[in-house]
Amino acid sequence: RSKELGRNSFQMYKASMNARSLERLSMQSRFQSALENGEFELYFQPLKCLVSSRLTSLECLLRWHDPNLGMISPAQFIPLAEELGLIVKLDEWVIDRACAQLAHWRKANIEIRHLAINISAQHLTQGDLVSTLRYALGKYNLSGTQIELELTECSFVSNFQRAKAVLTELKTMGVSIALDDFGTGYSALSYLTKLPIDILKIDPSFIAKIPDEYGNSEIVSAIIAMAKALKLHVVAEGVEKQEQMRFLQKLGCHAMQGYLYCKPLTQAAWYEFYQAEKLTS
Ligand code: C2E
Ligand code: MG
Ligand code: MG
Ligand code: MG
């Protein structure tokens, strides 16, 4: 009897396993066909220099237009792609498209000094980021100095030595390294001096509460002071209000990104923004 029970629960277990792997499989093929059918699109969000008040760089932000579900946010599909082991493939697609875009803009005489690409933490340990980027730079005849890679702290936690080796190699190619979502991680700050990081991006959760909320302004001001002392470029993310911008400017924050300056744009909308910006500067 107990043998029978065991067999039953094993059958049930097998059935649920099958359902799970089926789901996994269908999501995997959904991603694959989405890539092939051009359902992914890169948007671009401009960053503004707080010293010169001019456009400094752009960040690539991925969008997924599902024909049935409509627009799916990267906050939803990036974690899913990570779980399914598809993120490296997606990042590689973004790297290729971002570099193609830079080459295209160069032809159109649009001067982009820096284009930032988000790289998933898994990419540092599972993929070959250096080869992928080197290949794309060669394919579109670009310099590494035009590329900024945005990483989060998680990238260094799982395999510090490997992350350090990859970042060091990227630096020799002229690539800049930004630490995204700064202030939300849990690791020690010592990695700031142990890794070749160039840029700190302060997480929007801190920016949302300045300048009014006591404690937050002090944290933001301390982050900016620390970044400057370490000779890092510091960027505030999620700036939506004029008073936030003024506060950041007073503290000597180098650049800002947020709806106050501009939302993420399609490539066509970006082109218009660029033309208008050129006229006013
Ligand atoms: P992130 O890299 O920190 O990107 C900034 C996010 O803040 C973007 O969300 C942007 O649209 C949003 N944002 C910009 N300004 C404001 C503002 O003033 N207010 C508010 N509330 N939000 C603002 P998005 O595009 O939804 O992307 C979410 C996250 O998904 C990104 O966070 C990034 O971690 C990830 N992601 C996006 N594109 C890619 C990609 O190509 N590859 C990888 N691996 N991850 C990506
Ligand atoms: Mg980012
Ligand atoms: Mg990011
Ligand atoms: Mg961020």
Image: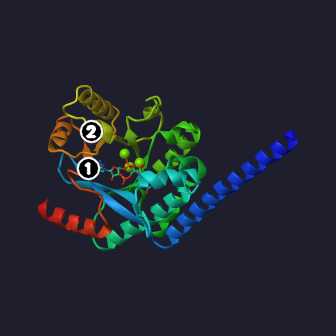
In the image, what residue occupies the spot 38% across and 69% down?
103
Measuring from the top left, give residue 177's x and y in whole percent: 42, 46
Q: Amino acid at mark 1?
A: Gly
Specify whether tag 1 is near ligand 1 (CB below 8 Å): yes
Disc 2 crowd rating (10 Å Cα; few below 14, some 14-19, many 20+) is: many
In the image, what residue occupies the spot 68% across and 52% down?
16
- Residue at the left extreme? 280
Task: Give the residue pinned by disc 2.
Answer: 207
Measuring from the top left, give residue 239's x and y in whole percent: 24, 45
Task: Give the residue pinned by disc 1.
Answer: 258
- Along the line of sight, the residue nearer the viewer: 46 or 144: 46
- The quadrant of the rendering that contains the N terminus is top right
Measuring from the top left, give residue 260's x and y in whole percent: 20, 50
Q: Quadrant of residue 271?
A: bottom left
97 over 60 or under it: above or below: below
Q: Is residue 173 visible?
A: no
- Along the line of sight, the residue nearer the viewer: 77 or 232: 77
In the image, what residue occupies the spot 35% across and 40% down?
200
